[in-house]
Image (cartoon, rainbow, N blue to C red):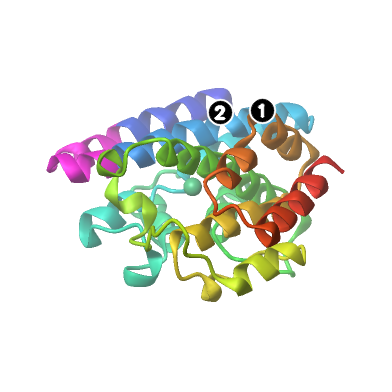
Amino acid sequence: MKKQQLDSLFAWFDRYVEPFLDTDPEGAKNIQLKIEHTRKVCDVMALLSAGENLSENETHIAAATALLHDIGRFPQYRRWRTFLDSSSDNHARLAIDVIRDDHVLADIDPSEQLLIEEAVRFHNLLAPPDKIRSHTRQYIDLIRDADKLDIWRVFVELLAQPPEERASAAILGLDEAPDKVSAPCIAALDAGDIVPLATITCFNDFKLLQISWIYDLTYTTSRRLLRERGYIQSLAATLPDRPDIRQAVSKALAALSA
Ligand SMILES: [Fe+2]
């Protein structure tokens, strides 16, 4: 994939997302959040590509994956006014529809098209499929790490804002009661597992899930970026101060430094 092809993709993205901002202030805020997320995931992907010594061609493919991974969020929000896949449609599948309908990758080498589409399609799965060609797997792992690094940023920034200024769709409608937290979520984190989605009943549980993503990172560079950015400490500081939570978080931080 050539630099010029990547540049046209970025230009296409700007043209594509613009009309989605033409809505009420609440909607525009939510759309803006996703545009910003996409740009920052692209920034993280550039750091990951450099840190993991990707070739120039691989770096371009990874950048295209980052740019397109959440393109399904725009039609999703316009149609359902939510970013919750469970109450609308899988945003990764919607992304593939956009890529195909708009012929976004039409002038790109078919084998590279496939790599990008597969990475986009699988970026949000709880666990990526086992049986996958090794080269595709690399881009799936890259986008999953880059996406997580920016989702951490979004939530840390969100938590620093007064509740009334937050983009409504970002907290997914979860109960924000400060002391509410579910024992199975703490137990999963303490065991070094990803917190299962089914055990999440409130916003604090969701923070525990986000901390447990430490155990789902693939690349050394991702772990380094996460340590440097201190997102886990910021998230943990907003959890109830309890010994069981402190212990589970300390274990996760130790795993991050290992
Ligand atoms: Fe994303």
Q: Residue tagged by mark 2? A: 43
Q: Which label is found at residue 169?
A: none
| The quarter of the displayed image where residue 226 is located | top right
Magenta stretch prevailing secondary structure: helix
Q: What residue is at 32 percent from the left and 38 percent from the top?
A: 162
Residue 1 seen from this side: no
Residue 187 is covered by the magenta coloring: no
**Residue 148: x and y, percent?**
58, 46
Residue at position x 21%, y 38% in the image:
21
- Residue 24 seen by the camera: yes
Q: Which residue is mark 1?
A: 47
Give the magenta range: 15-30
Q: CA distance from mark 2 to mark 1?
A: 7 Å
- Secondary structure under the numbered disc 1 in the rendered image: helix
Amino acid at dot 2: Asp
Whether tag 2 and tag 1 are in contact, CB under 8 A, the answer is: yes
